[in-house]
Amino acid sequence: MNLDQQLQSLIDEAPKDGSTPELIESIAPVLSAIAQRLQHLQYYVVQTLDQNWVMLTLNPRTQDETEKNVIYAFPSLKDVSSSPYNLADPNLIALPVPVTHILFQMLAMDKDYSTIFFETPGNAMIGTEVQRSELEAMIHEYWQGQADAVTEANIPSDIA
């Protein structure tokens, strides 16, 4: 699935509660922009059998840093096997998840969470971190830009 198809799938599968599909449509350009910075259309995410994503807590290396809660997203199933997850646990499974779905799901997390997207198969040492707070800030900035554009478009040219 390409990014547009992923976003349409998110909209189509959203609860028909009167606001969620419209919310997804309103943030789709932001999700797409972030996804375009990443190298893969889908990543493997370790989950419990009831589809809860497994998060890890990274301990700080220095006193200036704080603990960080992360989800790892891997480019291949093989990469998951060399990860810190205990895949011998019968309650864990790694499933492919479209990149835009990962980004959207991040909005349900606490602000201090991040997802680390590992881009290079076979290398789980270097990844691209997307912080939940960064995602939220980009959405607010986008919405503000949209509101400003609508305001400017509604100002009559003969206002003076």
Image (cartoon, helix red, strand yellow):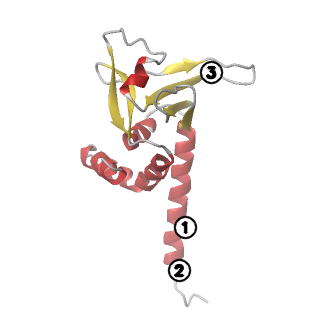
Distance of mark 2 from mark 1, alpha carbons?
A: 11 Å
Q: In the picture provided, is 63 more to the left or to the right than 151?
A: right
Distance of mark 3 from mark 2, alpha carbons?
A: 48 Å
Pointer 3 or 1: first along the chain: 3
Amino acid at circle 2: Ile
Q: Position of residue 110 (x, y in %)?
A: 51, 31
Q: Which residue is at a point 52% across and 57% down the rendered structure image?
A: 142
Checking the image for residue 67, the label placed there is: 3
Question: Which residue carries the number 2 mark?
Answer: 155
Q: Position of residue 13 (x, y in %)?
A: 25, 44
Q: Position of residue 24 (x, y in %)?
A: 37, 50
Question: Foreground mark, 3 or 2?
Answer: 3
Pointer 3 or 2: first along the chain: 3
**Number of numbered discs visible in the structure rendering:** 3
Element type at marker 2?
loop
Query: Can residue 19 be seen by looking at this rendering?
Result: no
Question: Foreground mark, 2 or 1?
Answer: 1
Question: Which residue carries the number 1 mark?
Answer: 148
Q: Quadrant of the C terminus?
A: bottom right
Instruction: Tell me where residue 89 sits by quadrant.
Output: top left
Q: In the picture provided, is 70 more to the left or to the right than 89?
A: right
Amino acid at circle 3: Glu
Question: Mark 1: few, some, or many residues within 10 Å (few <14, many ≥20)?
Answer: few
Where is 69 relative to 144, above or below? Answer: above
Element type at marker 1?
helix
